[in-house]
Amino acid sequence: MASLQASCTILSTNTRSHSFSTQPLSAKPSYLFTRPRRSHRFQVSCDAKKNVETSQGKIDRRNMLLGLGGMYGAANIVGNPSAYADPVQAPDFTKCGDAHDVASGDALDAKCCPPLPDKITDYKLPPVQIMRIRPAAHRASSEQVAKYEEAIRRMRELDTTDPQDPRGFTQQANIHCAYCNGAHDQVGFNNLDFQVHNSWLFFPFHRWYLYFYERILGSLIGDPTFALPFWNWDNPKGMTLPPIFDNTNSPLYDEKRDPNNRGSAVIDLTFSGSTDNLQLVANNLTSIYSEMVRSVSTTNDFMGKPYCAGTNPSPGGGSSENGSHTGVHWWVGTKDTTGPNKYNEDMGNFYSAGRDPVFYCHHSNVDRMWTIWRDVLKTDVPKDITSENYLNAEFLFYDENKQLVRVKAGDCLDQRRLGYDYDRIDLPWLNYRPPKKATKAKVSNISDAKTAASVLPINLKKTVRVIVPKSAKGKVDEQLMLENIETDTTKFIKFDVFINDEDDKIEELDRAEYAGSFAQVPHKSKTKKGTANISLRLTSLYEEIDVSEDDTVVVTIVPRSNGEDVTIGGIKIVPVPARSS
């Protein structure tokens, strides 16, 4: 299996200060404050090399980046603007600030800083004595549902009896807000957000988050066997809101959900706009197959782009995060853009998503998709990232004993070591590879297409068609690169990509021309501007539409939501990077 030592590109950083102490901390009268602007000091590209060559000779990279003073502190690097970064450190809770909305300047209800700790300990996984099996929500037994409801009821009661109890419902919801909406800075890089979305931190952060959440729920009802259900939206039988969340008298209910998407409404993971339930199911299965198998060229395509200390937030999410994960968030959240939930609370915005109990069951299935991709799927793409910058990335969580613990991404790769696994459910999306087209599309028959170079950068106010040259002829392994995708982070963004699409059936994704998608959940941050890159593997698609011998293809980009807030800076087709075994 290939060893992936992917690099991180660091932009716009300032000096790095002391790391978070593990000694007891004294609470400040107020630790919600307004931060100064970032200073732009140097550019750093990251991956693990012990020494860096400068005009002053070789320097130990730790001296360079720890910022502990001396001539080799990062702020003092003048002659050589490149250095090497470290894994992201756990945030400093004493420096937590407000999450806020940059579009309005309104802080809303987004004070989500955690309680201050007495101490921090490095977490050691307890021995697995009982394997907790997470059930599909739509198949959960009455006993499992009763336990779940009672656990959530007790968690909600803590909000009243002790609002600072880190196990309480609001405090647990605030974890997602703080890590995702600019409340935490990266340690040593003031005013550079610690962001766990749109990068390779996405899967490990949310796995640890659910791990402690599940253990807290079990502890509150005195049941170490308690397992969090998962919303099985990748199976047609689970493609509606699970009934256990739709009982208005249940603690699992949240009134801030789209009222049109209750009951028997079939989820539209792709936002195709189809009103045909059978077509919605087909689109959902096609999209999941694409994000799990067909469009994935490299490990980072699925897991997300590298993110290290000093890296600008959100370098790029993986295919599952940008696909079904985002689709569920938006489908559940309200669409009241002018009312009290104008930011699509609760599920439709990162800062409020944890306030809806369905969030945790949704992410339980997201986590399950990681286990399937890693343990079940047989593809030529390596499944593990071995970079120390990934494995040693740190997070802080309160455990079921109200102790603040430090964990690392590399310690959660196997869910069974964490004491849980998933109920086995059929994977119908594995059969949704599109069939080969009976007739070959002709680029000359696709009207209004221009060369990509002549129209870049492209705004997606409307559907765009561009002619893109292939890198080679024949049966080659190629990928489509969409680069410098600039978005408004406060908006829900979604667009789909097709190759040689002459039929223009934009509501149907279950066909050979569909290449993949990009989506973004709105989130509060210090800047409205987000930048991402995506790559979509074309190898199977070429076979299915018979264009192996062509010199060019037509790329069609269909905006589904807020296309006017999306600009694509680059489009090209390149060979898939070589993989070693």
Image (cartoon, rainbow, N blue to C red):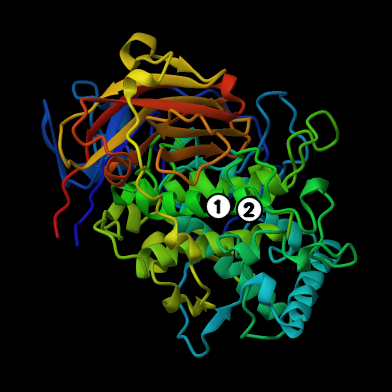
Q: Position of residue 558 (x, y in %)?
A: 52, 28
Camera sees residue 20:
no
Q: CA distance from mark 1 to mark 2?
A: 6 Å
Are dots 1 and 2 in contact, CB under 8 Å? yes
Q: Position of residue 5 (x, y in %)?
A: 23, 50
Answer with the quarter of the image where residue 392 lies. bottom left
Residue 39's tag is none
Q: Residue furthest right?
A: 249
Q: Residue furthest top?
A: 454
Q: Residue furthest front?
A: 438
Lateral position of residue 362 relative to residue 342, left or right: left
SS under mark 1: helix
| Label 2 Cα neighbours within 10 Å, binned few <14 / some 14-19 / many ≥20 | few
Q: Position of residue 458 (x, y in %)?
A: 45, 16
Answer with the quarter of the image where residue 67 lies. top left
Q: Residue furthest bottom?
A: 129
Q: Nearer the viewer, residue 308 or 5?
A: 5
Q: Nearer the viewer, residue 114 or 322?
A: 322
Residue at figure coordinates x 74%, y 82% from the top left: 221
Q: Nearer the viewer, residue 195 or 507?
A: 507
Residue 278's tag is 2
Amino acid under disc 1: Ala
Q: Is residue 237 above or below residue 350?
A: below
Camera sees residue 98:
yes
Lateral position of residue 487 relative to residue 79, left or right: right
Residue located beneath label 1 in the image:
282
| Label 1 Cα neighbours within 10 Å, binned few <14 / some 14-19 / many ≥20 | some
Q: Position of residue 154 (x, y in %)?
A: 80, 73
Lateral position of residue 48 relative to residue 516, left or right: left
Question: Which quadrant of the rendered structure holds the N terminus?
Answer: bottom left
Amino acid under disc 2: Leu
